[in-house]
């Protein structure tokens, strides 16, 4: 344990930095940030901002820690993966071990139009640690509508990209990409990912977050910045003002907030189907007993995992499930009905 005297020293090197100072540190302590997604980008953002002393960080993530995460998701360890701990819970535990003075609010949940108002409340800043465009356009709509800044961050392979969105002042995500990309595109599960690329993208985004929170708005980058660490390439696209005619920040149309066109079953990565149409709580302990005769089953307070060759089901207390071993929605639905009930 550290003594109160040593705690005064915690931020001393950061306070010495002229861009922050004592006043900047006070502002960080008083600030409130919401992080959507706590995978690789989210881990790095959460760790950096928690160590920097951001007073309250709300972490929203529906996933649990898996062995394949450990190569790049710096907040998690083997014990978390063995326990299949939800990332939002594991992250809060890790952060508490190195900074017990700040508040971490964990929400084991998907961010969807139906819960975005409740989950977001009043953050000063929203950070993107997600892995999909559906959620990013949802965040963009919410941020523009409510005039809350957010920072887009993404990485795949050796490539990373980030953009600061200050509503009314800079371009928004839809100013630059009018619509979410269609069809198939590379993901970490198809193209792999370098841990250094995702951590660099997150480091840049965390720095921009600190500038914004301490009031150094004039130092914020006003471009879409991308880099490829393997090819030694770097590019910037101007994003210093909203695009005339942008449906989101110009016309104030927010289709993603009403969930238009949003499927109830979505593919989440390769060879798996997520089912989130059933909003009835599940008693994981009871379900574990019921599934025991059918295959291997393991559960804790947050998640149940069930293996029945060739399928693997992950079930959450809210009734949401991820079924691995198929991409066929009909098959996944009938498995769900069989295992969990309809
Ligand atoms: Zn826009």
Image: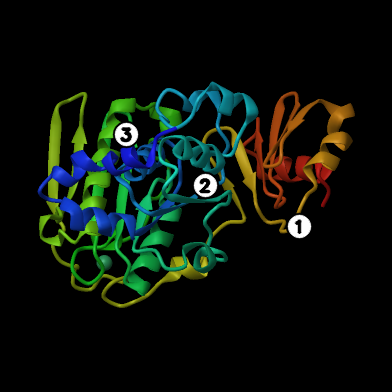
**Any mark on residue 280, and which?**
1
Q: Which residue is mark 3?
A: 198
Q: Residue at x 24, y 51 (%)?
A: 210
For residue 48, side relative to residue 35 (left or right): left
Looking at the image, residue 115 lies above or below residue 289: below
Asked if labels 3 and 1 touch by Cβ distance under 8 angstroms, the answer is no
Residue 313 x %, y %: 70, 35
Residue 167 x %, y %: 26, 68
Tell me the SS state at disc 1: loop
Q: How many marks?
A: 3
Q: Residue at x 40, y 27 (%)?
A: 72
For residue 64, side relative to residue 215 (left or right): right
Asked if labels 2 and 1 touch by Cβ distance under 8 angstroms, the answer is no
Tell me the SS state at disc 2: loop
Q: Earlier in the sequence, mark 2 or mark 3?
A: 2
Q: Which residue is mark 2?
A: 61
Residue 314 x %, y %: 68, 37
Q: Nearer the viewer, residue 167 or 74?
A: 74
Q: Residue at x 19, y 36 (%)?
A: 227
Q: What is the crowding at mark 2: few (fewer than 14 residues within 10 Å), some, or many (at least 20)?
A: many
Q: How many angstroms separate mark 1 from mark 3 (CA)?
A: 36 Å
Mark 1 C-beta to ligand 1 under 8 Å: no
Looking at the image, residue 77 lies above or below residue 180: above
Q: Nearer the viewer, residue 143 or 228?
A: 143
**Where's ligand 1: which quadrant?**
bottom left
Residue 290 x %, y %: 88, 37
């Amino acid at each position: 344990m550290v003594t109160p005297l040593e705690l005064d020293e915690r931020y001393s090197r950061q306070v010495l930095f002229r861009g922050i100072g004592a006043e900047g540190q006070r502002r960080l302590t008083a600030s409130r940030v919401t992080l959507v997604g706590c995978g690789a980008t989210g881990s790095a953002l959460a760790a950096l901002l928690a160590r920097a002393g951001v007073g309250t960080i709300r972490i929203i993530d529906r996933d649990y820690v898996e062995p394949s995460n450990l190569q790049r998701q710096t907040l998690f360890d083997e014990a978390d993966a063995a326990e299949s701990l939800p990332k939002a819970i594991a992250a809060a535990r890790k952060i508490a071990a190195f900074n017990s003075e700040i508040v971490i609010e964990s929400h084991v949940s998907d961010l969807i139009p139906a819960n975005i108002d409740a989950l977001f409340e009043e953050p000063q800043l929203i950070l993107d640690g997600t892995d999909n465009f559906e959620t990013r356009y949802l965040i963009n709509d919410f941020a523009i509508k409510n005039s809350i800044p957010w920072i887009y961050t993404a990485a795949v392979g050796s490539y990373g990209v980030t953009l600061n969105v200050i509503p009314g002042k800079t371009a928004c995500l839809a100013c630059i990409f009018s619509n979410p990309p269609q069809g198939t595109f590379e993901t970490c599960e198809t193209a792999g990912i370098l841990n250094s690329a995702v951590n660099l993208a997150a480091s840049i985004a965390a720095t921009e977050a600190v500038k914004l929170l301490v009031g150094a708005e004039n130092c914020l980058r006003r471009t879409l910045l991308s880099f490829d660490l393997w090819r030694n390439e770097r590019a910037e696209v101007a994003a210093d003002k909203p695009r005339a005619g942008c449906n989101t920040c110009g016309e104030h149309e927010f289709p993603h907030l009403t969930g238009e066109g949003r499927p109830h079953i979505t593919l989440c990565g390769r060879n798996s189907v997520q089912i989130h149409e059933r909003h009835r709580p599940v008693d994981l302990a009871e379900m574990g007993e019921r599934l025991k005769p059918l295959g291997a089953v393991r559960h804790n307070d947050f998640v149940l995992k069930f293996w029945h060759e060739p399928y693997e089901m992950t079930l959450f207390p809210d009734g949401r499930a991820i079924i691995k071993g198929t991409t066929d929605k009909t098959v996944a639905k009938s498995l769900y009905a069989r295992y969990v009930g309809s």
